[in-house]
Image (cartoon, grey):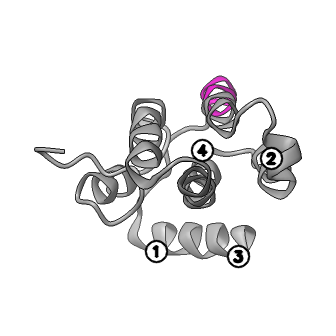
């Protein structure tokens, strides 16, 4: 499903003339590492599918969408406020790696990891 979503997104951006940010393998590796650390040392044992998926995703936008699954697992393991704080800590890593509209949507609270004023 991720490849279909990425292909559709790429098509829409191409029609609108929006160029995706240039890929940075180092930035993707840093994001992946941070997400795996949030999953925990026993992440593979507890969530093998997510652990494997995080290793298989090779772009920042794919990792951005995987945050939803990470959020669900963190809510299950801890609680929702902790999960939100964890995902918020990833936001700086995504800046400049994904379209600004995705980052803006998180700041408006439409996806996990929102960073609203007063929270």
Of the two numbered discs 2 and 3 in the rendering, the one whose residue sits closer to the viewer: 2
Spatial CA span between label 3 and label 1: 17 Å
SS of the residue under disc 4: helix
Stretch of the chain drawn in magenta: 24-30
Of the two numbered discs 2 and 4 in the rendering, the one whose residue sits closer to the viewer: 2
Q: Are marks 3 and 4 in contact (CB under 8 Å)?
A: no
**Going by the image, does 116 lie left or right of 85?**
left
Tell me the chief SS of the magenta region.
helix
Looking at the image, which residue sits at the far front?
78
Provide residue 61's location: percent of width, then percent of height. 57, 52
Q: Are marks 2 and 3 in contact (CB under 8 Å)?
A: no
Q: Are marks 1 and 4 in contact (CB under 8 Å)?
A: no
The residue singled out by tag 2 in the image is: 51
Spatial CA span between label 2 and label 3: 21 Å
Spatial CA span between label 3 and label 4: 16 Å
**Residue displayed at 60% across by 76% down:** 8
Mark 4 burial class by Cα count in 10 Å: few <14, some 14-19, many 20+ = many
Spatial CA span between label 2 and label 4: 16 Å
As drawn, 79 above or below 44: below
Q: State which tag comes first along the sequence, 2 or 3.
A: 3
The residue singled out by tag 4 in the image is: 60
**Residue displayed at 86% across by 52% down:** 48
Give the label on residue 4, or none.
3
Give the label on residue 15, or none.
1
Q: State which tag comes first along the sequence, 3 or 4.
A: 3
């Amino acid at each position: 499903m991720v490849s279909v979503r990425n292909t559709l997104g790429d098509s829409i951006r191409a029609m609108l003339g929006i160029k995706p940010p240039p890929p940075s393998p180092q930035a993707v590796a840093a994001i992946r590492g941070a997400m795996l650390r949030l999953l925990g040392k026993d992440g593979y044992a507890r969530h093998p599918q997510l652990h494997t998926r995080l290793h298989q995703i090779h772009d920042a936008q794919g990792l951005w969408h995987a945050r939803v699954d990470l959020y669900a697992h963190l809510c299950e393991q801890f609680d929702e406020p902790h999960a939100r704080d964890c995902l918020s800590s990833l936001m700086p890593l995504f800046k400049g790696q994904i379209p600004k509209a995705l980052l803006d949507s998180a700041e408006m609270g439409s996806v996990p990891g929102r960073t609203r004023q007063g929270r």
